[in-house]
């Protein structure tokens, strides 16, 4: 993979690396600078990838930065800036099935974020921080590529800018998607019409990955046994009629038959008692709240798009929990 930096509103390559960022021990030794204590300057930041999940898994860093550096001023790029830097062709790779686009993903995740102080344009900052600015505590080779050791990407980015283990114990950086009072009232009203005041869960059995990636679904069904009988909102590429899902969750509600937008579905997933299914961006984006997450992982390891508190299941039935900080 290639380490990139953004300088003067252009992308520059720093060359090929095994993994993006710097080892955490170099920061501890003072070999790599981080943000100074009580930093009160600007922090312009952008992602280099724009799927719903790419944006979702790092959506908690802004609130976390404000918690550690109360005087910091955070800037996020305008869509014009993102397009000028990355180009339409690359950005089009984050449009799936004609249902989403990179800019609709930005809107779904970043709308109403109270921790963004400014939307910036070309020419406003000489240097932009990105998700390539990260720091890892350890690396492994998972049989496919070099990866961090089940360390959430949000933590790696924050570690690069001065966060320590002690910070992570008291500052939450799980995904955060923010809704206005009007949005919350509207979505709560729709939910009440569908299921009353019942507790509910959400199921996702759809993915842009090939179907052979998704062996092991039966293990998910066992993990959600405590929730059998709850109403279950779902989106599935499979017909669930006559399936175990229908047997244990007879009150199935297809998201496709509702008028919930993608952003509204994130809110529903935040409110759920549990989320279960394939590893996917929309579920990752909602995993920083009360819902328990049971996720079927398509890779040999969880990699950096993991969320603390989540239960990850592999095709052979192996289960791994990314524990919360203690």
Image (cartoon, rainbow, N blue to C red):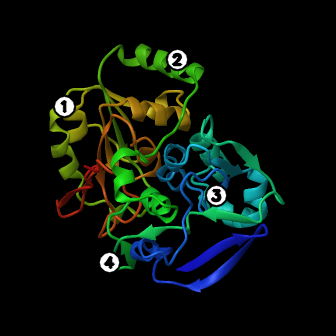
Helix, strand or loop status at disc 1: loop
Q: Does label 3 or label 1 sit earlier along the sequence?
A: 3
Task: Identify which residue is drawn at 64% across, 53% down.
Answer: 102
Residue, disc 3: 46
Q: Does label 1 or label 4 sit earlier along the sequence?
A: 4
Q: CA distance from mark 3 to mark 4?
A: 27 Å
Please state if 116 lies on the left or on the right of 278 as rendered. Answer: right
Residue, disc 1: 228
Please state if 80 lies on the left or on the right of 237 as rendered. Answer: right
Label 4 crowd bin: few (<14), some (14–19), many (20+), radius 10 Å = few
Indicate whether 273 appears above or below 27: above
Label 2 crowd bin: few (<14), some (14–19), many (20+), radius 10 Å = few
Give coordinates of residue 6: x percent, y percent: 70, 69
Helix, strand or loop status at disc 2: helix
Q: CA distance from mark 1 to mark 4?
A: 37 Å
Task: Identify which residue is drawn at 18% across, 44% down.
Answer: 223
Task: Identify which residue is drawn at 49% across, 43% down.
Answer: 67
The disc label shown at residue 140, or none: 4
Which circle, 2 or 3, is nearer the viewer? 3
């Amino acid at each position: 993979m290639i380490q990139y930096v953004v300088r003067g509103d252009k992308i520059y390559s720093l060359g090929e690396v095994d993994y993006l960022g710097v080892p955490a021990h170099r920061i501890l030794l003072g070999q790599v600078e981080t943000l100074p204590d009580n930093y009160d300057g600007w922090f312009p930041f952008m992602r280099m990838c724009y799927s719903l999940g790419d944006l979702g898994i790092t959506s908690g860093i802004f609130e976390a930065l404000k918690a550690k550096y109360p005087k910091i001023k955070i800037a996020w790029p305008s869509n014009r800036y993102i397009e000028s830097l990355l180009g339409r062709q690359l950005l089009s790779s984050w449009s799936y099935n004609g249902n989403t686009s990179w800019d609709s993903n930005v809107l779904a995740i970043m709308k109403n974020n109270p921790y963004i102080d400014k939307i910036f344009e070309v020419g406003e900052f000489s240097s932009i921080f990105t998700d390539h600015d990260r720091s890892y505590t350890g690396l492994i080779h998972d049989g496919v590529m070099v990866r961090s050791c089940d360390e959430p990407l949000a933590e790696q980015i924050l570690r690069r800018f001065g966060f320590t283990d002690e910070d992570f114990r008291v500052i939450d950086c799980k995904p955060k998607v923010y809704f206005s009072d009007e949005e919350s009232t509207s979505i709560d009203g729709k939910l009440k019409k569908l299921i009353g005041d019942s507790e509910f869960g959400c199921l996702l059995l759809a993915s842009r990955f090939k179907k052979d990636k998704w062996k092991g679904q039966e293990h998910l069904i066992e993990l959600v046994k405590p929730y059998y009988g709850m109403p279950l909102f779902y989106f599935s590429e499979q017909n669930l009629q006559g399936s175990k899902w229908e047997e244990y969750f007879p009150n199935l509600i297809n998201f496709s038959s509702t008028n919930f937008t993608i952003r509204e579905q994130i809110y529903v997933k935040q409110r759920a008692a549990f989320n279960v299914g394939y590893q996917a961006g929309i579920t990752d984006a909602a995993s920083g709240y009360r819902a328990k997450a049971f996720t079927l992982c398509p890779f040999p390891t969880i990699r950096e798009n993991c969320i603390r508190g989540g239960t990850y299941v592999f095709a052979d039935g192996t289960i791994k929990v990314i524990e919360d900080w203690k």
